[in-house]
Amino acid sequence: MSPGPPTDEERLARVALTRVIEPGDVVGGRWLREAGAVEVLRRIGGEEERLPGVTARRWEGLRARAAGVRPERDLAAARDVGARFVCPGDAEWPLPLDDLGDARPIGLWVRGRPSLRIWAVRSVAVVGARACTQYGAHMAADLGAGLAERGWVVVSGGAYGVDGAAHRGALGAGGATVAVLACGVDRPYPRGHTQLIGRIAEQGLVIGELPPGDHPTPSRFILRNRVILASLGE
């Protein structure tokens, strides 16, 4: 599904579409596969007949979102926090994400210095309950540290409970960790983990599908889990 490096026009269109199409939207993913990002953005943003698979109401909602996109501004906001946009066809794109088919991300906002694709080759997900016990948090931290010491990249969601403990364990061991957020990578969530996510961005990677400044929603938390799982290994 990634035939070659994206053109500048294709990349900019994908940046714009991260504000228009929700993560995991298989209808939007089919449009991208069949027509390409440039044409999809043109159709949504113009006076064209609506694309197949959506109601008139939803089409108008997409058009309203498209009217406000400013991809150059989003790229500038990302650069301000040391982030970049990685999309299918880039050398840094983890190939297992293509296995998601039409549900694969439009692109990923990546904050941090390491290569996401290289880190994904030897990575393992550690996720669990937010309201975990003290023992659960202790075990997650031990697991994160042990994996990091053995050269594994610990991938989790940056949340309270098990996620945060796993990240801290990996960081404490001087190892590699990746936080996959359900919001913009410039907007740490939960707020109580602002310092932790900032530390991950310095020592590891913070990634997400949503553009800078975007907020999490319940559905976005659920859908980001597919990225945590699908990006593992090559």
Image (cartoon, helix red, strand yellow):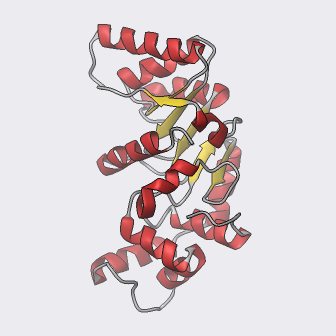
Picture quarter with the C terminus: top right
Residue, x 43% and y 26% (percent of image)?
192
Whether residue 212 can be seen here: no
Picture quarter with the N terminus: bottom right
Classify residue 94 as left or right of residue 104. right
Looking at this rendering, what residue extends furthest in the front direction?
Answer: 234
Classify residue 12 as left or right of residue 53. right
- State whether residue 93 is above or below residue 63: above
Q: Exactly how many numbered labels are in the figure?
A: 0
Residue, x 40% and y 46% (percent of image)?
226
* Residue 70, image x, y percentages: 60, 67
- State whether residue 195 is above or below residue 95: above
Residue 150 lies in quadrant:
top right
Residue, x 60% and y 77% (percent of image)?
38
* Residue 160, image x, y percentages: 37, 25
* Residue 110, image x, y percentages: 61, 44
Residue, x 43% and y 72% (percent of image)?
30
* Residue 92, image x, y percentages: 67, 48
Q: Nearer the viewer, residue 37 or 75?
A: 37
Q: Nearer the viewer, residue 219 or 121?
A: 121
